[in-house]
Amino acid sequence: MKVLKISGIIVAVLVVGIFVFAKTNHVAPLGMVSSDEFDNYSGIAIKGYDPVSYFVSDKAQLGTEDYQYEWKDAIWYFVSEENKNSFMANPEMYAPQFGGYCGFAVNAGFTAGADPTSYMIKDEKLYLFNGADVKAEAQAGGKEFFDKANANWNKK
């Protein structure tokens, strides 16, 4: 009886832990997000990072409220009026793939929040990841990794 009680407590702790992890990392099945939707937990796309900065300065830079633009039900921040105008002229070029969710998660068939400082530009497209370790796995996976992630994203 005591073993069952301890097992029950362990299972309950695991369930709560999984729920908390899923909530904080925005983990969800791919079918629960629209291809027109961006990960904007707080209403701010890519946690306030300027999507154009990845391309023009080759680094992740936080934008400001001074330069913002609403697109696809999210507010996008920029570091300058010039970056904002570039985005407005061609948002599909600068917006991260997979709605700003972690590319590794999409490859695995679900969504998870991404760390905007863990990114890669491949074939002139911006990909975000949930950390350096999964970014490294994506790089190691090469073309097949991105083909699978794109197929998963497009079939939802």
Image: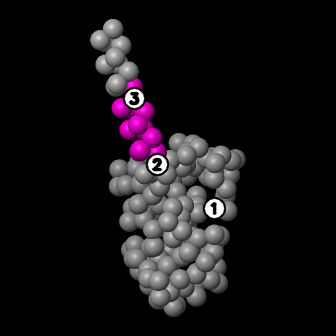
Q: Classify mark 1: helix, strand or loop.
A: loop
Disc 3: which residue: 12
Q: Is residue 15 covered in magenta?
A: yes
Q: Between disc 3 and disc 2, whose residue precedes?
A: 3
Q: Is residue 137 above or below residue 53?
A: above
Disc 2: which residue: 23
Q: Residue furthest bottom?
A: 81
Q: Position of residue 11 (x, y in %)?
A: 39, 25
For this rendering, which residue is in front, 60 or 29? 29
Nearer the observer: mark 2 or 1; the answer is 2
> Magenta segment, which residues?
11-23
Tell me the number on the disc at residue 37.
1
Nearer the observer: mark 3 or 2; the answer is 3
- Magenta stretch: dominant SS? helix
Nearer the observer: mark 1 or 3; the answer is 3
For this rendering, which residue is in front, 110 or 143? 110
Q: Amino acid at mark 3?
A: Ala
Work out whether residue 140 can be spotted.
no
Left/right placement of residue 128 relative to residue 72 reads: left
Q: Is residue 46 covered in magenta?
A: no
Q: CA distance from mark 1 to mark 3?
A: 33 Å
Left/right placement of residue 140 relative to residue 107 reads: left
Work out whether residue 113 can be spotted.
yes
Q: Residue at x 44, y 82 (%)?
A: 64
Q: Position of residue 100 (x, y in %)?
A: 53, 62
Q: Amino acid at mark 1?
A: Glu
Q: Position of residue 135 (x, y in %)?
A: 41, 54
Q: Mark 1, residues whose alpha carbon is within 10 Å: few (<14), some, or many (≥20)?
A: some
Q: Quadrant of the N terminus?
A: top left
Q: CA distance from mark 3 to mark 2?
A: 16 Å
Q: Amino acid at mark 2?
A: Lys
